[in-house]
Image (cartoon, helix red, strand yellow):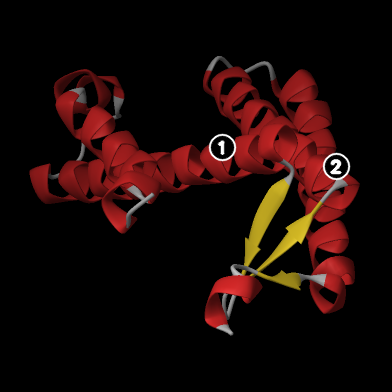
Amino acid sequence: MGRWAYYSPLWLGALLVLALNDALRASLPPREPWAHWLIVAGVAVLAGLQAQVLMVGAQGAFAQVLPVPRGRSIRGGAAAGAGWLLMAWVLLSLVTVLLGYEAVTQAALVLGVLGLAALGGAVLIYVWNIPAAVADFAEERR
């Protein structure tokens, strides 16, 4: 898998928000046009990052592999656990934003805290397992 394929959720998520910019700008309170575009650009970046995290989480959950810097990866149950927690965080954060937008603040607060707990668990699993990460393609490099 090349870089274009691996990072495609990042730019596809951003492009999706930019394609829907008219609806997003219409739902914002009245502001200067530059402020609306700044908000749209920020939401596009966040949507791209969420899509990328969702893809990495799916890779961890289903392929049981999470990338680590310097050509290594976390494999097995730790990768699966962190992957499921990352996917839970993406889902819970999206629902939190939607509930907050609809002014259902109590439910948004509860789901937001659960989402942050899922993200914290994923980060904890990831950091804990970095020393045990195996080198990718070790046989080919010899």
Q: Which mark is residue 81?
A: 2
Q: Is residue 117 left or right of residue 83?
A: right
At a point 22% along the width and 51% down the height, the residue shown is: 38
The Cα–Cα distance between marks 2 and 1, rounded to whole angstroms, is 14 Å
| Crowd class of label 1 (few under 14; some 14 to 19; many from 20; radius 10 Å) | many
Name the amino acid, label 1. Leu
Name the amino acid, label 2. Gly
At a point 32% along the width and 43% down the height, the residue shown is: 8
Q: Which mark is residue 54?
A: 1
Residue 55 x %, y %: 53, 39
Q: Is residue 76 visible?
A: yes
Secondary structure type for disc 1 = helix
| Marked residue nearer the N-terminal end (2 or 1) | 1
Q: Are marks 2 and 1 in contact (CB under 8 Å)?
A: no
At a point 26% along the width and 25% down the height, the residue shown is: 24
Q: Which mark is residue 90?
A: none
